[in-house]
């Protein structure tokens, strides 16, 4: 066992962990933050995406011991109060169905918008291509991220009602 | 109704507060992991559990021989075939469950799996379904007494002789062989459960990823009643589900082993499968080999169709169809066209592949049927050199022909196919695209336009024909309105992302005048929800949605009596507008639904039952028949063979729409699950029975990059028999999209003499054809 100290959503934790423990299990099992999900065993699906020192990473491919002294943000810490613009965007534009990929998508999109506050549709599609969604067909995830981008830039919000005539 | 209300369920999902099965943690919970077979077909000669048992933290290793003592080593499938829970002596497919390890921790269980020593005597598997049907093929199911071949069942529909006569005399005949490959639902959440057997109270609570919790409870009681788990002692809870798509209808061995383990040890046991296990061992979908034929006139009138199917079920028929329909609803294969004769026949066969197949986002084999009819219709158009849109217009069932009796016996409830295709052509700009295509072709560029105008058949189903293991396929709603006018409504269905908490609330709101925000919807707990058959086959709105409307109407009748009493008028003098009853001609004299409900608890008329609740079990009089007109435009890269979907216009008709935002979202998702098998997905096995792409590394689920920006729209042809005229929509796009894409690719290559492409249409396949045809 090895002792690590890690800050998760602003709270510092000191824990004894097995050196082989995956970060995603530390988050889900040891810290009971079950918003971060596991959807595959080959690091393809992105359901476990979190922020490690502000960078989106797949927490199934990192050992818990590797985050000693670092900062982690999960979906539970996305908004201190109310909803983050991305959360609002996903709800307003129907960017989720079953909700299983959603936390990973949200955390990936946080970094995407930080690096590129005004992404094109194509940039969004490439930007989330490490995260799989089986339900939505991605149209509305793209719109959700565009909505959040506009809101975070302080621009006029796009129409959120569906074009379905 | 008709309002894009934002979803009530979203708040928890976007904040990481969904409660999926792997999020459940119970005191003293144990973990189960499964030892799986590396061989597709082998005798098990020995299982040595000593080393595994010696690992600290391991409590048990369960084998087939252990389960045999309780007669739990085999279980029935939904199609009344039999499936091993754990094998006693033979494994029948690669990755089949061989033994289960129970340990105190997840990682220890995984370690112990590696320590279980299994000795096998491999045998030559039978992988090709055609070879499996040959007379000298080894008989796989020797466990079945007297079984002398690998044939499972034969099915047929239609008038063979009359159809053959038309084919004999027809001016034009086209024929094509098509394989609808084995694919996987690949919901992002895999399957799993927490089985919690309480020895003191002899009670089992089963948290599991199931789309049909009530049916599962009954099955558990039927299978385990003899050890004391009778139905009142079993509670099945289906928590939030991370996508189902039909893959979470069957009972998998893992669930049963977890129950057995919890029962024997007396502690909760969690089993969550890996993605690789999910892809390699859970029920597959499709795997139909189809010969489709169409007969018609030289000028384009369809006269008859014939279909011959070989259905590869793997080692057991574990399909999830209504019991009387071994090929599901394949007989919708006559399509949207008006002609008199069709004949379809099918044979099912055992092979050394995983069992199945599930109705993957498809109302029981409708995907296969639609692929066959929409492809062969295009083959016919190509053969007589007629525009495929015009050919469809000339053969559509007219809107005044409904209800329409199809050649294979279905009564289509309603439709307006001309309107749908007309609209799709206008949106996509069909005539201009044809001009562009001609110009590009002249320049040597490859572009194609493909159409699919399908008829779906959903909402199973009327109890006279539809049951699963004898349980009729009704569904239910129970609405309880509290004294302050707020309600809880419970259903026998189970959402896996479809947005039931919102849609059902909107139906009740519309019928009862209580705001949808004040209606709490619950599903998935068999102790509280009324009995129903669950959510799959686009049946929730057609069945439980109808039940919600009728239960609400029962309450409105009661409300009317109370309003008459409160207003001191007779019921005939009252009129309803959403939210209140008022006296005819005196709109000020009114009682709101909230006032009426309060009176039901505080001031109800003498002789009337107090309270305000109603339940309805809805038995649909017919299925519903949604339809769609889809047009796909593809560009093909000549250098690589890559197909790019440039545009895809989908016009759906699912009758009256309750929430346009949710319906459109369902269409987007379904289209992507139609794109996937058309271009990317297939579970591939080699001759030795090894799966070649059993992980997400090599089974390509489309990302946002492969998926085009879908263009969607709708027409409205209400179902005449559904209480709110709705039809169901979730599966139409999955069913309708693949042939539109294939038709577009074939259209792009038709000038080279290409008449058909097998799915998935991968770049190497296209490149090879281009090379063969000298078009590179």
Image: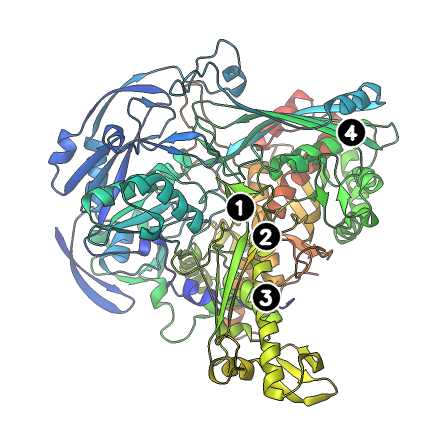
> As drawn, is A67 to the left or to the right of B453?
left
- In the rendered image, the residue lying farthest to the right is B299
Q: Chain of mark 4?
A: B
**Distance from the alpha carbon under mark 3 to that under mark 4:** 41 Å
Residue under numbered circle 1: B472
Give percent across and percent down for residue B179. 59, 28
**Distance from the alpha carbon under mark 1 to that under mark 4:** 34 Å
Q: Earlier in the sequence, mark 3 or mark 4?
A: 4
Residue under numbered circle 2: B619
Same subunit, labels 2 and 1: the answer reads: yes
The chosen color scheme is rainbow
Of residues A148 and B738, the one nearer the viewer is B738
The residue drawn where x is 47% and y is 23% is B350
CA neighbours of label 1 inside 10 A, class few (<14), some (14 to 19), many (20+): many
Kindly indicate the quadrant of the structure image that contains residue B276: top left
Q: Chain of mark 1?
A: B
What is the secondary structure assignment of the residue under circle 1?
Answer: strand
**Distance from the alpha carbon under mark 4 to that under mark 2:** 33 Å
Residue under numbered circle 3: B507
Same subunit, labels 3 and 1: the answer reads: yes
What is the secondary structure assignment of the residue under circle 3?
Answer: helix
Q: Earlier in the sequence, mark 4 or mark 2?
A: 4
Q: Nearer the viewer, mark 3 or mark 1?
A: 1
Q: Which mark is residue B602?
A: none
What is the secondary structure assignment of the residue under circle 2?
Answer: loop
Residue under numbered circle 4: B304
């Amino acid at each position: 066992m090895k002792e690590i100290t890690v800050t998760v959503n602003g709270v510092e934790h000191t824990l004894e962990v097995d050196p082989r423990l995956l970060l995603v299990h530390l988050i889900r099992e040891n810290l009971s933050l079950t918003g971060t999900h596991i959807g595959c065993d080959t690091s393809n699906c992105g359901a476990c995406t979190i922020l490690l020192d502000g960078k989106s990473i797949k927490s199934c491919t990192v050992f818990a011991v590797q985050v000693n002294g670092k900062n982690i943000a999960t979906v539970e810490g996305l908004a201190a109060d109310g909803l983050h613009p991305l959360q609002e965007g996903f709800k307003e534009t129907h960017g989720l169905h079953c909700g299983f990929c959603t936390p990973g998508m949200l955390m990936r999109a946080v970094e995407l918008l930080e690096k590129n506050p005004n992404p094109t549709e194509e940039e969004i599609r490439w930007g989330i291509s490490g995260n799989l969604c089986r339900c939505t067909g991605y149209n509305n995830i793209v719109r959700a991220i565009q909505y959040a981008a506009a809101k975070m830039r302080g621009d006029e919000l796009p129409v959120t009602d569906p074009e379905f005539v | 109704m008709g309002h894009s209300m934002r979803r009530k369920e979203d708040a928890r999902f976007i904040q990481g507060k969904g409660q999926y099965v792997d999020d459940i943690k119970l005191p003293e919970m144990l973990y189960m992991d499964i030892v799986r077979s590396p061989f597709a077909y082998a005798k098990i000669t020995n299982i040595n559990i000593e080393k595994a048992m010696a690992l600290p933290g391991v409590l048990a290793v369960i084998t087939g021989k252990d389960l045999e003592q309780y007669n739990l080593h085999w279980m029935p499938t939904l199609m009344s075939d039999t499936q091993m829970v754990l094998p006693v002596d033979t494994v029948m497919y690669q990755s089949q469950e061989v033994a289960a390890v129970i340990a105190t921790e997840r990682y220890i269980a995984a370690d112990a799996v590696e320590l279980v020593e299994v000795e096998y005597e491999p045998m030559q598997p039978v992988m090709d379904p055609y070879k499996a049907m040959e007379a000298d093929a080894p008989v796989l199911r020797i466990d079945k007494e007297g079984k002398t071949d690998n044939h499972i069942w034969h099915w047929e529909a239609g008038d063979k002789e009359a159809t053959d006569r038309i084919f004999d005399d027809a001016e034009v005949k086209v024929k094509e062989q098509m394989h609808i490959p084995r694919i996987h639902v690949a919901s992002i959440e895999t399957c799993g459960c927490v089985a919690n057997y309480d020895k003191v109270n002899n009670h089992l609570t089963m948290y599991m990823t199931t789309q049909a919790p009530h049916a599962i409870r009954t099955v558990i009681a039927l299978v385990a009643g003899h050890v004391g788990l009778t139905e009142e002692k079993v509670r099945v809870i289906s928590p939030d589900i991370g996508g189902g798509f039909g893959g979470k209808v069957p009972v998998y061995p893992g669930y049963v082993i977890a129950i057995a383990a919890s029962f024997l040890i007396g502690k909760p046991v969690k089993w969550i499968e890996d993605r690789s296990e999910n892809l390699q061992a859970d029920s597959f979908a499709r795997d139909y080999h189809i010969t489709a034929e169409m007969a018609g006139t030289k000028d384009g009138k369809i006269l008859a169709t014939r279909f011959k199917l070989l259905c590869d079920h793997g080692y057991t028929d574990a399909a999830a169809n209504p019991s009387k329909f071994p090929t599901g609803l394949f007989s919708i294969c006559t399509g949207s066209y008006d002609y008199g004769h069709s004949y379809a026949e099918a044979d099912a066969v055992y092979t050394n592949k995983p069992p199945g197949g599930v109705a993957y986002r498809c109302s029981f084999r409708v995907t296969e049927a639609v692929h066959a009819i929409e492809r062969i219709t295009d083959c016919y158009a190509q053969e007589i050199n007629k525009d495929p849109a015009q050919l469809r217009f000339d053969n559509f069932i007219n809107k005044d022909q409904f209800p329409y009796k199809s050649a294979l016996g279905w009564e289509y409830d309603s439709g307006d196919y001309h309107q749908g295709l007309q609209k799709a052509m206008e949106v996509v700009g069909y005539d201009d695209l044809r001009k562009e295509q001609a110009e590009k072709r002249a320049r040597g560029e490859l572009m194609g336009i493909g159409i699919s105008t399908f008829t779906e058949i959903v909402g199973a189903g009327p109890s006279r024909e539809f049951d699963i293991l004898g349980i009729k396929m009704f569904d239910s709603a129970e609405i309880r309105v509290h004294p302050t006018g707020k309600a809880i409504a419970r259903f026998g269905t189970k959402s896996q992302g479809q947005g039931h908490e919102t849609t059902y609330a909107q139906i009740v709101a519309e019928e009862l005048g209580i705001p949808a925000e004040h209606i709490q919807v619950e599903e998935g707990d068999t102790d509280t929800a009324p009995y129903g058959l669950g959510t799959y086959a686009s049946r929730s709105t057609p069945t439980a949605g109808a039940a919600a409307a009728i239960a609400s109407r029962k309450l409105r009748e009661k409300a009317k009596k109370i309003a008459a009493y409160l207003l001191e008028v007779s019921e005939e003098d009252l009129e309803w507008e959403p939210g209140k009853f008022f006296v005819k001609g005196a709109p000020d004299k009114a009682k709101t639904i909230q006032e009426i409900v309060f009176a039901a608890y505080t001031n109800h008329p003498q002789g009337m039952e107090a309270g305000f609740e109603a339940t309805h079990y809805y038995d649909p009089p017919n299925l519903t028949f949604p339809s769609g007109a889809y047009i796909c435009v593809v560009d093909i890269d000549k250098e690589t063979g890559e197909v790019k979907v440039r545009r895809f216009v989908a016009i759906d008709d699912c009758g009256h729409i309750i929430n346009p935002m949710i319906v459109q979202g369902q269409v987007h998702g379904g289209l992507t699950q139609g794109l996937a098998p058309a271009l990317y997905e297939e579970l591939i096995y080699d001759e030795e029975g090894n799966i070649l792409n059993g992980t997400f590394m090599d089974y390509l689920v489309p990302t946002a990059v492969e998926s085009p920006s879908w263009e969607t729209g709708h027409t409205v042809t209400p179902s005449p028999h559904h209480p709110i005229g709705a039809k169901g929509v979730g599966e139409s796009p999955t069913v309708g999209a693949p042939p539109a894409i294939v038709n577009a690719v074939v259209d792009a290559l038709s000038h080279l003499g290409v008449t058909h492409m097998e799915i998935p249409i991968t770049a190497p396949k296209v490149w090879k054809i281009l090379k063969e045809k000298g078009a590179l």
